[in-house]
Amino acid sequence: MSESDQKRRVSLHGQWSSHLAFVLAVSGSAVGLGNIWKFPYIAGVNGGGAFVLVYLVCVFAIGLPIMMSEILMGRRGRRNPVATMALLGEEEGGTRHWGIVGVIGVAAGFFILSYYSVIAGWVVAYIFEGASGAFEGADTDQVGQIFSRISGSWIVTGFWHTLFMTLTVFVVAKGVEKGLERAVRILMPALIGMLLLLLVYSMIAGDFARGLAFLFEPKFSELTGSGVLVALGHAFFTLSVGMGAVMAYGAYLPAESSIGATSVAVVIADTAIAIVAGLVIFPIVFANGLDPAAGPGLIFQSLPLAFGQLPGGSIVASVFFLLLSFAAWTSAISLMEPAVVWLVERQEGLPRYVAASVVGVLIWLLGFLTVFSTNVLSEFTFFKGTFFENIDFVTSNIVLPIGGLAIVVFAGWVMSANSTADELDPSVGIGYRLWRLSARFIAPIAVLFIFLNAVGVL
Ligand code: PHE
């Protein structure tokens, strides 16, 4: 038995049934509201092209190496992210204090899920709006009214948020391996298929040329330092990195799976889906006189217009929002997973369903700050805006990049080249060298630079 095999520990929990199951789980985590709801909305608010370019650079130069770092650390530690960071910290750097990075990640997942569930609740509500025929022939004003009717009532929004959180707790309580695999394998291709169908619609009925120009013609005058920070934060958010979600999934990864190839595939798929979503939405926005900078309601106001004009649009709408709910669900599960495995592994004898319920109830309660942000507390603003906007800004653009920075510095500087090569590529090929260059220099320097730039130091 080689030294590396001796070091490979037995997982505290099960393993993915196959490599494909792992790829599906990570894709299920990555692809979600971030791609279809958030990317178009923040690209719109931040002026389009230049923002998109920075986002793409951040995804590949920073997000990808961090995703690889998280998976390799997860697999080496084979525990929840907090215990993995502490254990590897002790082995590689002589201190267990690295566990704090895991704790910050658990907290980030907690806060992100609190608002993610509210937006996902709207998506679930739209399954029923679509089926009821409400979008048929609706004009811009009418779709706006539908959105206000839902987001403007804390009872309605709170109801759907409650339902979504319940469904999420249900899966996490049973253990993530079961069910998730099947859901992603069938539903993700279906969602991609629907997006492509909508893309055809946008090409024909939307102002496609203008949508294309908006997304791909970089106008750097439109981009602010804080826009660059939002692009960076979104690179983390959309790839689910910086908080241990992917690390938690890596803990179940069989030793022989290739981490590099998996990560590259997931990153490309995730990015492609976001770009297609943008190409669907902006042509509809421009053709119907909507404001690209409309904010978080953007997809809820643009997509129903398209569905309303399609033959059989009510059913198409309903199915689309159903599939998007599933995509959000698989992401929400991964947002909760680190907190739940942490509790289960810490508290010996604590059943998983108890841990999942406790965490779920706390997140559900916290979610009401976001529920109230589009109605009773919509006027209550500070720093970046409403509670929702502040939770989103701080978690995505500050906490995830700091978590990611710590993770990549750990993998690049604290872990020995032997350990990381052992997980990524024992033959130390070009891919490994590129990863290490990025983990040691490019990713940390870029994150620091964008931070300093955003606070106006540079
Ligand atoms: N990546 C998910 C999305 O794009 C959100 C997410 C963020 C999931 C962080 C897990 C961790 O919707």
Image: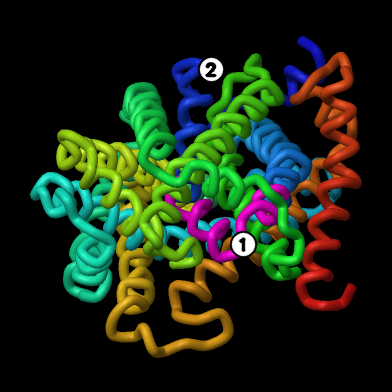
Marks 1 and 2: which is nearer the front? 1
Residue 291 position in % (x across, y down): 45, 65
Q: Is residue 20 above or below residue 281?
A: above
Q: Position of residue 368 (x, y in %)?
A: 32, 73
Q: Nearer the viewer, residue 373 or 414?
A: 373
Q: Is residue 294 left or right of residue 239?
A: left
Magenta segment: 36-53
Give the mark nearer the N terminus: 1 vs 2.
2
Residue 305's spot in the image, x, y percent? 28, 51
Q: Quadrant of the N terminus?
A: top right
| Residue located at (76% from left, 55% from top) | 406
Question: Horizontally, is 252 left or right of 425 in the view?
Answer: left
Disc 1 designates what residue?
47
Q: Label 2 is placed on what type of residue?
A: His
Task: Please tell me whether mark 1 sits on a helix, a strand or a loop.
Answer: loop
Q: Residue at x 42, y 58 (%)?
A: 113
Q: Nearer the viewer, residue 378 or 434?
A: 378
Residue 302 position by quadrant: bottom left
Mark 1 CB lies closer than 8 A to ligand 1: no
Please state, as top left, top right, bottom left or bottom right, where the C terminus lies in the image.
bottom right
Q: Main secondary structure of the magenta part?
A: helix
Colour convention of the picture = rainbow
Q: Residues within 10 Å of mark 1 (few under 14, many from 20)?
A: many
Q: CA distance from mark 1 to mark 2?
A: 40 Å
Q: Secondary structure at mark 2?
A: helix
Q: Nearer the viewer, residue 228 or 121?
A: 228
- At label 1, the amino acid type is Gly
Residue 115 among those drawn in magenta: no
Q: Which residue is mark 2?
A: 19
